[in-house]
Amino acid sequence: MPQPAVDDSASVQPFRTEPVSFVRRGGRMTDGQERGWSELAPFYVIPVERDAAVTSVRPGTEIVPEQIYGRSAPLIVEIGSGQGHAIVHAAGERPDADFLAVEVFVAGLARTMLDAERAGVSNLRLVEANAPEVLEHLLPEASVDELWIFFPDPWHKSKHTKRRLVAPPFPALAARVLRDGGILRLATDWEDYARQMRHVLGEADDFEPMFDGDWGERFEGRIMTAFERKGLAKGRDIRDLAYRRSPRG
């Protein structure tokens, strides 16, 4: 299977000592997805130097977005882009902005590239990597205008909640990459995770809520995806949250 990352597997170890917010499932790609890697990855996928695991990011390997996209424009990053439905649609609607999809599932990234190609979307790039390491090492400080996290894995069993992405260490990573006044958007169909998100961000000095009351309005820029339909079909309410990055001191 073609890989988008720099092949330094001989010098890395396959495991981390800290929990991550995903389980990297295997599985073969379709012929079309294989074509996506071989033909489209050179344009869409950002090569990543690895550190401790196959989806890690080596410290000191920060990218320069202006060089990646060939221009200076607002940058919108989606963590956990899945098959790319939301971000491909958004990139097509916002040609004035640049978009980055962060995902660990190769088949989803391949599907994203194929859909982007069909839609004629050229302002989108992809990275196969663990999201916290992307925020800590790959993206420059204050380089992101909006950071999206839509329907992250809820890890709803109590013994697994430590794997949730939006936990106390997360706000500092998000605040690092967001410019002053940048926006963090979140959505989930799991009420206890929504409450955890709200509590974690409510305790963060670097963020101010952009909503009154308990929850935010549904983000109009988010199209209806399979994850959202699945949650609604099971009778779960969709909860949106949005926060603005406070000015740096």
Image (cartoon, rainbow, N blue to C red):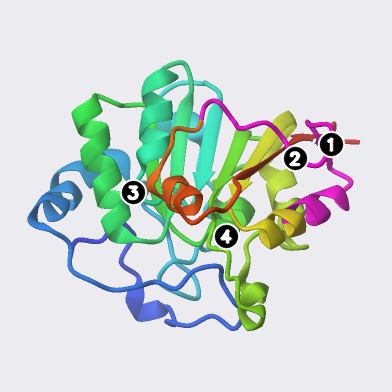
Is 23 part of what is drawn in magenta? no
**Residue type (three-letter) at the residue carrying disc 4:** Glu
Q: Nearer the viewer, residue 12 or 15?
A: 15
Dominant secondary structure of the magenta stretch?
loop
Badge 1 vs badge 2, beta-carbon distance below 8 Å:
yes
Residue ID for mark 3: 83
Residue at position x 57%, y 41% in the image: 148
Is 110 left or right of 162, judged from the image as shown? left
| In this view, the mark in front (2 or 3) | 2
Query: Label 2 crowding class (10 Å Cα cut-off): few <14, some 14-19, many 20+?
Result: some
Q: Name the quarter where the N terminus is drawn.
A: bottom left
Is 141 left or right of 211, judged from the image as shown? left
Residue ID for mark 4: 133
Q: Name the quarter where the C terminus is drawn.
A: top right
Residue at position x 49%, y 69% in the image: 22
Residue 215, labelled with which disc? Answer: 2
Q: Secondary structure at mark 3?
A: loop
Q: Which residues are magenta?
A: 197-221
Residue 153, labelled with which disc? Answer: none
Q: Quadrant of residue 39?
A: top left
User: Residue 136 location, x and y as percent?
Assistant: 63, 55
User: Residue 34 location, x and y as percent?
Assistant: 14, 55
Q: Nearer the viewer, residue 98 or 72?
A: 98
Badge 2 vs badge 3, beta-carbon distance below 8 Å:
no
**Of callouts 1 and 4, which one flags the residue occurring earlier in the amino acid sequence?**
4
Q: Secondary structure at mark 2?
A: loop
**Of callouts 4 and 3, which one flags the residue occurring earlier in the amino acid sequence?**
3
Residue ID for mark 1: 213
Mark 4 to mark 2 CA distance (whole Å): 28 Å
**Residue type (three-letter) at the residue carrying disc 1:** Gly
**Residue type (three-letter) at the residue carrying disc 3:** Gln
